[in-house]
Structure formats: C-alpha cells, structure tokens
Amino acid sequence: MKSYRNRIADDILKRKLEGKGAVLIEGPKWCGKTTTAEQIAASILYMDDPERKEQNIAMSELNPKRLLNGATPRLIDEWQLAPKLWGAIRFEVDHRSELGQFVLTGSAVPADTREITHSGTGRFSWLTMRPMSLYESGNSTGDVSLKSLFDGKTEVDGFSNLSIDRLAFLVCRGGWPQAIDMRDEIALDQAIDYYDAVVHSEINRADNIQKNPERVKRLMRSYARNQGSQVANTVLAQDVAANDRTTISEETVASYVNALRKIFVVEDMPAWNPNLRSKTAIRSSDTRYYVDPSIAAAALGIGPDDLLNDLKTFGFLFETLCVRDLRVFSDSLNGEVYHYRDKDGQECDAVIHLRNGKYGLIEIKLGGDKFIEEGAKSLKSMEAKIDTDKMKAPSFLMVLTGIGDYAYRRQDGVYVVPVGCLKN
C-alpha cells in the first residue's frame, strides 16, 4: 500500500474541525483532497462510487439524513453531486450541537446551486487544497521557514539541491500526488492526462454545458501564455479567434474561464492595496494563474527540454510554481497571497499578508545575479512607497529564486532564497 505523504493541510483541517461542525475541502481533482480527508475520517460516503452513485443521489432527494449516519468525523466525498446534502448537513450540525461532525470534499462548485438555500455561515469552515508544494513532495529541503521570518528571525541559512534541469522537470510534472513517486517519464504524463480530462469532460461538469474541446484548448493555451499578467478577457478572445473560423465573444470567453475557475483549474491573484505615501493609482485587475504550472506546460504542449531552450517561458511558469507554493504556505499562516502593480510601473510579484497585519514582499526570479539585483532594487523601492505611519513595515523583503545553492541575507537586508529550500 502506498504510504501517505503528510500535507500542510493536515493540521489546518484538524484545527478547523475543532471550531466548526463541518469543513468543506475544495480544490482541483487529483490534488489529494479525499486522501487527506480519509486520514481523519471515522466513516466515509463516496458519492461517486459507480456501484452506488445513482442510489446515493436518489437517497439524497428522498432521505438525505440517512446518508449522514455514521461515525464522526464522517467524510462525504464529492458532495456536490447531491447539493441537497448541504442543507441536511447544516441541519444536523445545528441539532447535534457538536463540533467536528463532517468533512466534505469537492472538485467542483455545484452546477446547480438552487438547492443550497443557506450559506453555511457559523456551521461550515472552508479549506482550499492545491497540488503539493515542493516542500510537501520532498523536493525542498525546508531550511528556510516563512513563519520564522514573520516571527522576526533576521538570519537565514539554507541549501537547495535543485539543478536547472530538475527545476524544469518539476515545473512540468507539477505537484500531483500520484506523480510524485513515479518514474520521470511517467510522472510527466499525469499533467497531460489531467489537461486532457479538463478539455474533454471536466470543464463541462462546471455548469452542465457542453463546450467545444478545440476552443477550450485554444483558451487554455492563451491562458498559459499569459501567466503572471493582467490580460483582459478581450485579449484572450482575440487569441482564441485567431485560429478559429468564427469569432468568439468576450462573454463566451468569460463563461469558459468561469467554468475553469469552478473546477479549480485557474486561481487568479487579487491586487494588494497598501497605504502609500503618495496617491499613486493602483492597478486592481487580477493576475492570471493556473493552480499548478504543469497545467500551463501541458496546455502549451511543452516539456522540460523546451523550457531549458526558452528561458522566458521557463520564467513565467516558474513564477506559477512559486505562487502555488506560497499559497500553500500562506494558508497555514492564516495569510493570503496578493500581487501589486501601480500605474508608475512599480510592481511586486507576491505579497503574503497575514490576518494579524504582518506582510512580506516577494519578487520571483528564475536566477542570475543581474535579475536578483533587479528584484532587490524593486523591493527596496516598493518598501519606500509604503506609509509606515498608517501600516506596519514589511516583515521581510525576499527575492525567491529557482537557481542558486544557498539562501542568504544581503547587506541591504533583502533575503535571497531558492525555492528549493523554502517551507511554511
């Protein structure tokens, strides 16, 4: 039997179950939601079990309470197949008056939400899972801790053993748990299989509307080409239409993107709005990202060798990998990841902002002394813009790199940290 690799979400799930009657785990298919929930579940209902799926759905209409009987915490896997269960679980949580009763997992938002008449506020807690970070998959040494930097640690000492070739492979393999222990050639196939499933079936589950697979491919390719940018739907529509005999409207593109969002394939990054010393206008558009860099690689039809021959594309997809890892880490720190862009050209690739008001500024660079220097200069410029009379000064400034053996603190106070030695 395959051994379970510990996930950062394990401790988050335990904590949330101590405070709420039910926890909903959401995220893309194959990212490990069910396996993580199984570690803590005392009984399990697999809604999409082929032998019982129709019976389970029918029972959810006739007598949903019966499906909830079992030792707690009770796992309801793929709950969105029977939206009526939401109300039944809320009712049970209210009347049992006990915490930690249910864990729900779902790889899609229900296509039909008419049966959900209550938000679940006060009864449910939400947990988003993503594919594995490099630390979870065993590809980061974890020598440098984000938590320690937020806690005031001033010195870092870390070592990364990732070569540029291995990093290119990890970008294309992604953080899919099933792929972690496979031979490299087979591991690379997993992201391609995931992409094919999205194109031909999964995207249609989001809203029960059949979509043109070729258009989905072109849209996902365009999305991949625009990783880390704030490109508008109109630009995506132009990209898709460039190789289509018929035009595609911005509204259609928006509906396709929304479907990808509902099945957790894309996860765009919101803008950060700090208190600034000047009245600089901040660009508030979301930045485009796939939930895992391997999806972008599959959509572009490229592999590790292609990235090594095109460092510009490598840099974009490396940024997506870093954003994935930072999101996984920030969840455990009660934080969110944002980006910053203003109309003066100032930018910051990632801002981790914690609920207690602490925050760290991060520039992401594939590597090279020139680019590290540029990143550090940008961070110091960003720091100078923040009005520290109205908000805290940043806890740290970091250039997060792909290439480089060691983590260290520069004389100007900026940390240079390879992603291969970072953890939460």
Image (cartoon, grey):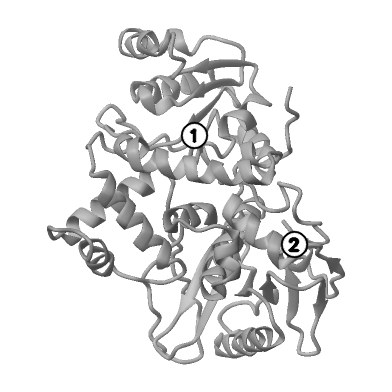
**Location of residue 270 (image quadrant):** bottom left
Percent coordinates x, y for residue 392 in the rendering? 63, 77
From the viewer's perspective, is the residue at label 1 or at label 2 nearer?
2
Circle 2 crowding by C-alpha within 10 Å: few under 14, some 14–19, many from 20: many
Task: Identify the residue shown where x is 63% and y is 45%.
Answer: 185
Please indicate whether residue 250 sits to the left or right of residue 301 in the image: left
Please indicate whether residue 93 sits to the left or right of residue 117 in the image: right
Q: From where the camera sits, is residue 355 visible?
A: no
| Amino acid type for the residue under numbered disc 1 | Phe
Return the residue nearer the eye: 223 or 283.
Answer: 223
Q: Kindly identify which residue carries mark 1.
A: 124
Element under disc 2: helix
Label annotation for residue 103: none
- The alpha-carbon separation of the residues under discs 1 and 2 comes to 35 Å
Quadrant of the frame with the N terminus: top right
Name of the residue lying farthest toward the left: 246
Task: Identify the residue shown where x is 54% and y is 36%.
Answer: 30
